[in-house]
Image (cartoon, grey):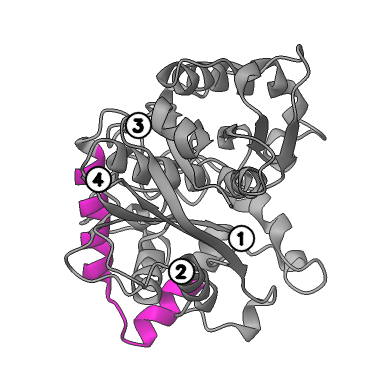
Amino acid sequence: MTPDVAIVAYARTGDPGAQADLSELEMLLPVLREALAQVDMAASDTDFICSGSSDYLAGRAFSFTMTLDGVGAWPPVSESHVEMDGAWALYEAWVRLRSGAGDTALVYSYGKSTAGRPRDVLTRQLDPYYLAPLWPDAVSLAALQARALLDAGLTDEARLAAIAARARENAAACDHAGTPESTAAPDNAGTPDTPDTPDTPDYVVPPLRAHDVPPVGDGAAAVVLATGDTARRLSPRPAWIRGIDHRVEAHALGVRDLTDSPSTRLAAERAGAFDRPVDTAELHAPFTSQEVVLRRALRLGGTVRVNPSGGALVDNPLMAAGLIRLGEAAARVHRGESDRALAHATSGPCLQQNLVAVLEGDTP
């Protein structure tokens, strides 16, 4: 039989403003140790290790090999890497465990966004013939999506401001989140702005104001996966991955309806998200306008608590923010604060690639 797989441990970096002076390994190592300590394991005890990161952020090829010191080169381990957010590394590890190739896996990801100007670096994701030569930065593309939503009457700036205010209130209640000062959004020149409020009058790129835009920050996350009885032995309440799927939109932005996300809807359907209601949703929505799109695609009603951690709008370490959404959803299941949670991760401009997972705890 295909084994059930659960997230049994999760750890992440704390205040994003405290990571800038650390190397990737220095930032990652405490996170790995914390996650493994929760299940009393060493990296060498796991059957598989998978990581996610980006060479473009690091500015050098095969940069992920530098952080393998965090898991050790001896004894030999079975290891893989994806040039993606760590949510997709978790998907690879989940497939491996479901295939019966092991009972445990360590998944981690990290990103040093402050090493460059992410809104420009991310243009390398675009079509190299028509879009990339125009250098439309990531914030400007998100502004196009926000404008499409406003023009379609699907949201307004007051609603976007309310989303931003709720995200910061939720983050302030979480010990791991940075303060509003340490998570200030970048201005149009890519340098930190003063702390923003929903009443901030200045646009970053119209119609997006400073509070609608994610901060530039560094961070890392790690989770431990386990199957069946192993998961029950390692965790008093495992977060079982009942379904997980990922889909991709057309590469060309001009052939997409930016007010909708069919790939998110299809991934959610295949993951079983619509079979029964969820009580929590951790959405990887770096911009306030993207939460509007995702709420509609995922059919989230007013009773669902969305981004109780604050979400990527407050803390957005590239290549780790998606894995953090899975980890935060799992942590709520671990603590008994959620029975059925949805986690979402995205990559690419304007929600181009989307992954959806459904996590559940054992019923009494």
**What residue is shown at x 79% (from left), y 33% (from top)?**
60
Task: Give percent across and percent down for residue 230.
Answer: 48, 31
C-alpha separation, residue under disc 4 versus residue under disc 3: 12 Å
Q: Earlier in the sequence, mark 1 or mark 2?
A: 2
What amino acid does circle 4 point to?
Arg
**Residue topped by disc 1:** 348
Q: Earlier in the sequence, mark 2 or mark 3?
A: 3
Looking at the rendered structure, which numbered label has been put on residue 11?
none
- Per the rendered image, the range of residues in magenta is 143-171
Looking at the rendered structure, which numbered label has been put on residue 268?
2
Q: Does residue 232 belong to the magenta stretch?
A: no
Q: Residue furthest bottom?
A: 152
**What residue is shown at x 18% (from left), y 68% (from top)?**
302
Please tell me whether mark 2 or mark 3 is closer to you in this view. 2
Please tell me whether mark 3 or mark 1 is closer to you in this view. 1
Looking at the rendered structure, which numbered label has been put on residue 168?
4
C-alpha separation, residue under disc 3 versus residue under disc 1: 25 Å
Q: Is residue 161 left or right of residue 86?
A: left
What amino acid does circle 1 point to?
Gly
Please tell me whether mark 1 or mark 2 is closer to you in this view. 2
Is the magenta region chiefly helix, strand or loop? helix
C-alpha separation, residue under disc 2 versus residue under disc 3: 33 Å
Q: Earlier in the sequence, mark 4 or mark 2?
A: 4
108 w.r.t. 118: above or below: above
